[in-house]
Amino acid sequence: MSELADHVESAVLIDHHVHGCWSAQGDAGDRIRFESALNEADTAPVTEVGAGFDSQVGVAVRAHCAPLLDLERHVGADEYLTRRTALGETEVSRRFLQAAGVSDWLVDTGFSAGLVDTGELTAASGGSTHEVVRLEEVAEQAAAAPGDYAEAFDEILGERAAGAVATKSVLAYRGGFAGDLGDPPPALVDIAAQRWREAGGTRLTDRILLRFGLHRALRLGKPLQFHVGFGDRDCDLYAANPLLLNDFLRSSGDTPVMLLHCYPYEREAGYLAQAHRNVYLDGGLSITHLGARATSFVGRLLELAPFRKILYSSDGAGPAEFHYLGARLWRSGMTRVLDGFVADGEWSAADAMHVVDLIAHENARRIYRL
Amino acid sequence: MSELADHVESAVLIDHHVHGCWSAQGDAGDRIRFESALNEADTAPVTEVGAGFDSQVGVAVRAHCAPLLDLERHVGADEYLTRRTALGETEVSRRFLQAAGVSDWLVDTGFSAGLVDTGELTAASGGSTHEVVRLEEVAEQAAAAPGDYAEAFDEILGERAAGAVATKSVLAYRGGFAGDLGDPPPALVDIAAQRWREAGGTRLTDRILLRFGLHRALRLGKPLQFHVGFGDRDCDLYAANPLLLNDFLRSSGDTPVMLLHCYPYEREAGYLAQAHRNVYLDGGLSITHLGARATSFVGRLLELAPFRKILYSSDGAGPAEFHYLGARLWRSGMTRVLDGFVADGEWSAADAMHVVDLIAHENARRIYRL
Amino acid sequence: MSELADHVESAVLIDHHVHGCWSAQGDAGDRIRFESALNEADTAPVTEVGAGFDSQVGVAVRAHCAPLLDLERHVGADEYLTRRTALGETEVSRRFLQAAGVSDWLVDTGFSAGLVDTGELTAASGGSTHEVVRLEEVAEQAAAAPGDYAEAFDEILGERAAGAVATKSVLAYRGGFAGDLGDPPPALVDIAAQRWREAGGTRLTDRILLRFGLHRALRLGKPLQFHVGFGDRDCDLYAANPLLLNDFLRSSGDTPVMLLHCYPYEREAGYLAQAHRNVYLDGGLSITHLGARATSFVGRLLELAPFRKILYSSDGAGPAEFHYLGARLWRSGMTRVLDGFVADGEWSAADAMHVVDLIAHENARRIYRL
């Protein structure tokens, strides 16, 4: 193995956007659940057996995860699931989390059904965990609180953010990025909050209140993560083009803004990271689901974005295979892309190792002040 | 040759979206006609001799088609056309159609000027043919029929579809995908039909009637093919982004929807194929015109789309070179991309051969019930 | 070196869109100025030392430019800048300009602060220079002139264009391409001109007057260059998608329209070059800033655009490193991409050398009548 490959393999990662893995309460061998998880975009359960495995991530699980369960690479799906059942979720999770080579997990706790909490993730992985607060969840808590909505939002955000490292917005799932994203006037916030409370105060889609939350997060100053591009079908991918955030970013001040996932807009996101000093990007989730095609995607992440503006994440949620595959495919992809740069004489091996360190952990450590 | 390469070379193809090749009535050596066909997007005849050959598909014709006319690879354009004239259109077509390795041709009969019909295509190719009914043609027939438009449409669609395997929409050429694509109320259909009939009832561009046709096709339940992305200049490529179909697809039920061509939106189309259980895609037409760059495109088709959702087509129309090149370039591209996956240890050779079979014919056989 | 590689290395280039390099008045070793130039999109000066070098173009400077300053490839940034200071701007420029292998520079003179003029560029490079007139600058001159705006515009454009080879529009920086780009009626032009003059007549953003200028340029008939896609943050990248120019291009007649830079819309631009007989494209600026990733981009430029429709430019402005790197990275990228086509049997080496000549200089010589 080249010195560069070895460097990438041993690089300690900070996974700056992730969720919990499945808790031990679920059935580790539940085939429908497992195959359904292999399809990110379709939210309904798989109905054809094998359909989940007929995908890049399905092939990647059989290639890269099987050996960690003591199976041969490329083992059949049946055999994989049988072994998974035999080991049980706790042991499966332990193996994958520890093999990821992650020192710090920044956990978006806004999606948690059936998943371990941060304490369990720490215990199973041996790494540290830090919380990322979802703004739309803060909004729901403010809607349920007594008194003025804006004051309640500020108080809840202040309390929760005190122990957290970042905030997160799922605006991409709540109408997307098109239109005015300016800070709304207080009177409009009051009216919108009253209307939303009367409607039950769940699943925030009101644009005024979404915008209000974003600007409160900017004012807070901790890094603000945005879901961008690829996600499940509730997301309107057309309106999740990060270029639509341009005006918002122009007025976002110094608060770091993190563009997550980004597929198929990773080149657009790279431009934004070059244009705006406080903008960063990653390719989490996308890398996992691209499997053998992740290398090509990793290459495109290394275009216009300055190298101090790119981070690593897995966006793993559910099967701990994803917490591992994000790392496994990022490492392989980086090695292939950077080996190519070096073989072509475009980069020195030292350049490559420096950029690996920036993306693996240095940028995240600096931005999140870990 | 590797076992995988051999497997790809010998895979029987179902070409699920194609047109006729040129009929014997044309002049096989008509240089203007031939060079003009090498430019898909510009609809006016080529005026500079050689301009058509100065393109990826022009180089691909000289590389891959020449040997089938008993010429050397990379032969000059003049020599190629001289030989084409000497053999005549019938013999040229016979050679290319048979060399494509296609068992079944699904023929969009909505564009037929100067082309052979399905009977002639069967005879020349030795393969089976099946009809794809163009919805806008059904609309024109309904406009010309007596009585209620909607009833006439239903009756004509029912009759024509009884002997056909699919329907096809060229909405991309009639204003594109932006805006409301819901099922229009009958009263609006009546008014729009009356207005269109009064205007002559040709080249349907009325949005109400276009939407009406789409929803009738959904109700019919046979696969509905959509022209997406790359085509001639009558298509507004900006409005042919398949992500604009998202709301339509969300409400499209179980009817298979096939996204054709897709360039430069193949990654967006792949996302839709993952998000919607009834959505499929191909790279026909694009692969042919990309020539040496087809490999890169074939790779991008293998990203988010589950492998049971990808099909093969050539979209050949006119020179039978295109019916062959679609297959030739797809096979070479698949072999290079999959060989890469296997060499990297990402896929097993068995994985690769399985996916080749799905795309080459298994998916089409299942979806079209051939 | 293969015959093909040798052919690419020795191909004489016409750089059909470029600006001056830094004049000798500046400080050749000004680190803030140099690092800031390595970030195209962010217009504010770099504040973190080293941030500019942590980018593709920063690594490319150390890899490819260092040897021309008698340093080793991949030398450190400090050493590079020390050597640059010692040589001085004049000597640095002389070396890079002459090493670019450019016979003719087509200079957009609309951006000139701190840059050499065309006479100095001729002297330093040994190549010929030709002027490209920026339409928005003509507009500002017309606003400052007495009498009727439209008449003044025509007179100034006529005078300046007489000695120039092309016009240039920065519409991408003045609101982008969305919306009506038709020729505005004279009465509206009068009103808009009066309003703009009253407002001071600087930095034209009025859509009526911008459209007026474009149509005057079409009528002039000399090639009209458009900034497309990637640029600094004043450009709204979302609205700089060239597909939004489709209607304008449909009615643009015979005047050659040149789409510049194009990232990340190079595939869309290639489609337009195929669809419209008078449309051309290049990848200038983008290639430079993509560094080791330029090869991938150069490949994408060779997709749908006919080969008589692709040109070379560097868009160099400021450090003469950029005038050289555009050529250096284009040559390396072309060699790698074309070597791949030949190795795959898709192209003959003769095909490749023919296309190199078209893009390097033949197309530009024909279109600009040099």
Image: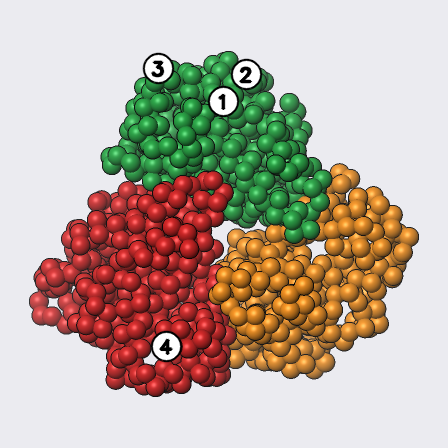
Chain colours: A orange, B green, C red
Chain to which mark 4 belongs: C
Q: Percent position (x, y) of residue B27?
A: 32, 19
Residue of label 4: C69
Q: Percent position (x, y) of residue C181?
A: 29, 53
Amino acid type for the residue under numbered disc 3? Gln
Identify the residue shown where x is 38% and y is 17%: B87
Q: Is residue C58 visible?
A: no
Question: Do the residues under discs 3 and 4 have CB atoms within 8 angstroms?
Answer: no
The crowding category of the residue bearing disc 2, from other C-alpha atoms within 10 Å (few below 14, some 14 to 19, many at least 20), is: some
Amino acid type for the residue under numbered disc 4? Leu
Identify the residue shown where x is 26% and y is 49%: C363
Amino acid type for the residue under numbered disc 2? Gly
Residue of label 3: B25
What distance separates the C-alpha of mark 1 from that of mark 4? 59 Å
Between circles 3 and 1, the one closer to the viewer is 1
Which of the pair C46/A348 is nearer the observer?
A: A348
Q: Percent position (x, y) of residue C200?
A: 21, 75
Chain to which mark 2 belongs: B
Identify the residue shown where x is 27% and y is 68%: C98
Q: Secondary structure at mark 2?
A: loop
Residue of label 2: B126
For the residues beneath circles 1 and 4, the answer to whether they share a chain is no
Q: Percent position (x, y) of residue A135?
A: 65, 70
Residue of label 1: B97
Residue A141 appears in which quarter of the rendering? bottom right
Q: Secondary structure at mark 1?
A: helix
